[in-house]
Amino acid sequence: MLAPACSEPIAAIATPAGKGGIGIVRISGSGIESFCTAILGRVPKPRFATFASFIDSQGRAIDEGIALYFPSPASFTGEDTLELQAHGGRVILDLLMARVLELGARVARPGEFSERAFLNGKIDLLQAEAIADLIEATTVQAARSARNSMQGRFSTRVNDLVEEVTELRLYIEASIDFSDEDIDFLADPALLTRGVQIEHSIHEVLSTARQGCLLREGLSVVIAGKPNTGKSSLLNKLAGREVAIVTSEAGTTRDVLREAIEIDGMPLHVIDTAGLRKSCDRVEEEGIRRAREELGHADRILLILDASSPESDGVLEDSLPPNIEITRVVNKIDLTGEAARLDHTERGATIHLSVKTGDGLDLLYRHLKDVMGYDERTEDVFIARRRHLDALDRSLFSIRQAITRLRGARELELVAEELRIAQQSLSEITGEVTTEDLLGRIFSSFCVGK
Ligand SMILES: Nc1nc2c(ncn2[C@@H]2O[C@H](COP(=O)(O)OP(=O)(O)OP(=O)(O)O)[C@@H](O)[C@H]2O)c(=O)[nH]1
Ligand SMILES: [Mg+2]
């Protein structure tokens, strides 16, 4: 791979703000050798750690440390890159940055190193996004799957899909040219079989990507129910600390309380809300309004019911948003003597448990992991973003359109067109097809220095 002939040198402090044992200034671009000569007095041996003094314009040492020089194209960005590892103090790093800027570099924008790596073909867009996701990962599972994406596992799956779609499309396009002749290409059952296989493969990648997206963003679970059913007790139990006030008085919780937790590395946002009932208390009323607002944004609702209270909760359940999945949790089984259990009905799962004794909580944990598509074999999971899910969804739609036409054995040109759209949607994921606006949005959310 050849790096671009001339690219303006950029520089950034790549380590976090504040004090640290080591602080790194990173420079990338063309003509980095002249930076080496000016600051280090020599060009360090490529890819070797070189101990050196970092010299200012007056010939005074700013600091001493390790210099690492990666000439183009064998560097992260594909350009010449120099890393100066100094002591991690603000003043030292600011002086080093000033020196580098004085020599002609400009301050890098957030994510600009990764953007250059992408533009120089060192990594694709998926891998670039995975770098940011690895840095942002809050759980071990998220970090592992970000690494999988960064190493290209997701990209390989997407590239394979693109290849399969392209192959089918080329075959169909070629047959359009022969359609005057007496051959009925569309009647070939192998074409339909191929289409259905591709649909299946996209579907498979989509469901892994959905799980990867949940790992990145976390599942948002809202705890709702009548007052005093044990919602805040459940939040405290899941969080492992006393986040919310628990009392035997109905209407204790008014504010919306959020806790980020993880179950075996799967991130969850658990949200406790005010008990739902008719109230004349203005503060409680506002709490209930906020509770309903949260319910509208949930990925899943945990509807808490009281095993010891015989009243029906049907009316309450009917008032919940219809498009959001509900898990019913029948709490306080210690008062009724029921056994902990998980029932699956056509309305979804119902778990009978006691937050107080902890009986049945394991069922809830397992259920939540199932809902998130928890897979013990993390080596296959890759991190994904909504942008990828959207592109996969669109390609799945197009491939299904193509299959319908193939089934009807008509309009060869339209089948080819649907396949072209599917191919384009898939290519957006790895950044083969992209817009400047999209790149701007992606890279601007990166850290400076990455
Ligand atoms: N016996 C028994 N009591 C429980 C259980 N879970 C919660 N409680 C009790 O039920 C009462 C209400 O608990 P909370 O967690 O405050 O209930 P809530 O649903 O948050 O109530 P509001 O905030 O008022 O809507 C408290 O006295 C808890 O100790 C349980 O599993 N068994
Ligand atoms: Mg409460």
Image (cartoon, rainbow, N blue to C red):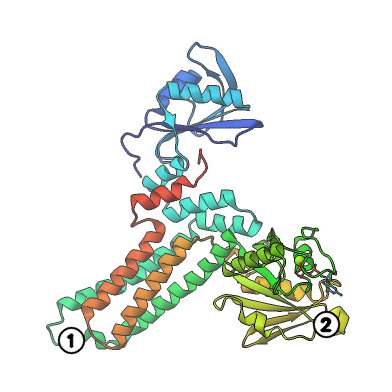
Q: For the residue labelled by badge 2, is the local secondary structure a helix, a strand or a loop?
A: loop
Q: Can residue 264 be seen in the rendering of this structure?
A: no
Tag 2 residue: 308
* Location of residue 3 with respect to 137 vertically, above or below: above
Q: Is residue 332 left or right of residue 404?
A: right
* Residue 110, disc: none
Mark nearest the camera among 2 and 1 is 2
| Local crowd size for mark 2, using a 10 Å CA cut-off: few (<14), some (14–19), many (≥20) | some
Q: Can residue 1 be seen in the rendering of this structure?
A: yes
Tag 1 residue: 183
Instruction: Report the front residue among 356 and 387.
Output: 356
Q: Is residue 215 left or right of residue 283?
A: left
Task: Give the residue drawn at x 20%, y 87%.
Answer: 184
Task: Give the residue drawn at x 44%, y 78%.
Answer: 200
Q: Is residue 249 left or right of residue 364?
A: right
Task: Give the residue drawn at x 79%, y 72%.
Answer: 228
For marks 2 and 1, the one nearer the N-term is 1
**Residue 157, percent across and down?**
45, 65
Q: Amino acid at mark 2?
A: Ser
Q: For the residue labelled by badge 1, is the local secondary structure a helix, a strand or a loop?
A: loop
| Local crowd size for mark 1, using a 10 Å CA cut-off: few (<14), some (14–19), many (≥20) | few
**Residue 206, percent across and down?**
48, 70
Ligand 2 sits in which quadrant? bottom right
* Location of residue 138 with respect to 100 vertically, above or below: below
Task: Give the residue drawn at x 83%, y 68%.
Answer: 249
* Location of residue 32 with respect to 376 vertically, above or below: above
Dividing the image into 4 quarters, which one contains the N terminus?
top left
Q: Amino acid at mark 1?
A: Ile
Q: Looking at the rendering, which quadrant does residue 273 occupy?
A: bottom right
